[in-house]
Image: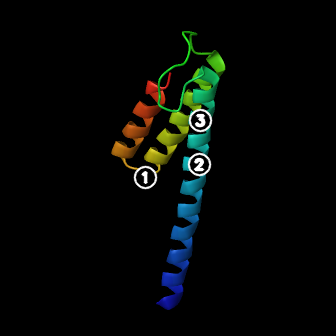
Amino acid sequence: MSDSNDELREQLDQIAREFGKAIEQAGDFARQAADDLGWARGGSRTSNRPPRPDSTQAAAGAIRELGKLRDEGLISEYEFEAKKAELLRRL
């Protein structure tokens, strides 16, 4: 019984590590998109320039990655929608 618990614990640890990496990557995409758009830390735009296509693509990529995490059951629908809304507000 202990061996199966240890194996399960190791699998859960691996999932947690992968989830952490994915969230970190999504955050990196979001920060890059914000930087590309010239946004201040407070979330407001610092210029009237339209979004650059590459920053829009970065945000879209982050949303796709989050969607995969949601589809795999690693994050909830609520977490997905909250992060997606945050990324879209930055565009």
At x 42%, y 50%, the residue is: 75
Question: Label 1 vs label 2: CA separation?
Answer: 18 Å
Residue 83 on image: x %, y %:
43, 38
Q: Which mark is residue 31?
A: 3
Q: Amino acid at mark 1?
A: Gly
Residue 63 on image: x %, y %:
51, 34
Mark closer to the chain start, 2 or 3? 2
Furthest residue toward bottom: 2
Label 1 sits on a secondary structure element that is loop
Q: Which mark is residue 73?
A: 1
Mark closer to the chain start, 1 or 3? 3
Q: Is residue 56 above or below residue 1?
A: above
Mark closer to the chain start, 1 or 2? 2
Label 2 sits on a secondary structure element that is helix
Q: Amino acid at mark 2?
A: Glu
Q: Which mark is residue 24?
A: 2
Q: Please tell me whether mark 1 or mark 3 is closer to you in this view.
A: 3
Q: Amino acid at mark 3?
A: Arg
